[in-house]
Image (cartoon, rainbow, N blue to C red):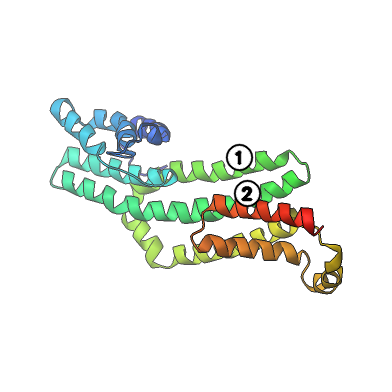
Amino acid sequence: MAENLKHKKAFRAGILRSFSQSAGINSETMQGLGYGFAMIPLLEELYAGDELRDAVVRESAFFNTYPGSVGYIYGITAKYEEQHAADPTQASEQMINQLKVSLMGPLAGLGDSLMMAVFRMIVTVIAVDFALSKNLIGPVFFLFVFHALYLFLRIKGAYVGYKEGPLYLQQFMDNGTVERLTRLLGMIKAAMIGYLVYRAIQIPIPDSWHFIDETLGQVLPHWLALIVVCIGVMLYKKNLGQKYVVLLVAVASLIVTLFLI
């Protein structure tokens, strides 16, 4: 997939090993141990003896990013390790370490904001809609679609990083693509959440409120559910923890059920 890939077998072995990146997570190096483990097949092709030991130690230093983004960094690191093995003046050890440090922060932010906060929510809403219809496609859809993109990013990212280098991400961010993509996915996410509120949250209306529901419901169906969700979001933004918001909604629902309905 990548042009001039010199050590294909070792490179692919490293991609496979990278899936265990978080298995060795610890408070000192975070994901560094797993990252070093992923780099070993390639490093064994490039170095021997003390140089191999130093390279493994170097690649096992502190590292922490969104796991789905690690492929891109792995590809770049592999490319520069090959250059360092051939001619240390082209890519120094310090340069390799600085590249990893400079990339893991932005990629962690992109992964968390796009994949986890936006794309996962969109896929979850669609899967929940299937589940509410008692359709077994729901959980299958979530597992397949979310992890298909996750695997694509990890594997394709490694080859893109090897071929294009660190400037690819910089160009991607400078031309506004990330900002436009974030805005678009954010709009889709908001629409999907709104649909989920309409589809999944059913709040009985007290008899004394039926005149309000008949009037307001024509303009804004399920208006009470929307108000409850908005209140929950406001409380969450006021730094009230998720568990307390859920507990408050549960208590309020119990009180309304016992005394108003």
Front residue of this view, candidates 141 and 77: 141
Quarter that holds the N terminus: top left
Image quadrant of residue 122?
bottom right
What residue is disc 1 on?
143
What residue is disc 2 on?
124
Q: Check disc 2: other Cα within 10 Å, few if <14, some if 14-19, many if 20+.
A: many
- Name the disc covering residue 91, or none: none
Q: Can residue 92 be seen in this view?
A: no
Sequence-first disc among 2 and 1: 2
| Residue 154 versus residue 181 in the image, above or below | above
Residue contact at pointers 2 and 1, CB within 8 angstroms = no
Front residue of this view, candidates 71 and 27: 27
Q: Which residue is drawn at 86% across and 63% down?
A: 207
Q: Where is residue 172 in the image (x, y as percent from the top left)?
A: 40, 61
Q: Position of residue 52 (x, y in %)?
A: 19, 29
Q: Can residue 62 be seen in this view?
A: yes
Q: What element carries label 1?
A: helix
Measured in 3D between alpha carbons, the distance from the residue under mark 2 to the one under mark 1, in whole angstroms, is 10 Å
| Residue 77 versus residue 57 in the image, above or below | below
- Name the amino acid, label 1: Leu
| Residue 24 versus residue 176 in the image, above or below | above
Q: Where is residue 46 in the image (x, y as percent from the top left)?
A: 22, 32
Q: Which residue is drawn at 41% across and 47% down?
A: 66
Q: Which residue is drawn at 61% across and 51% down?
A: 246
Q: What element carries label 2?
A: helix
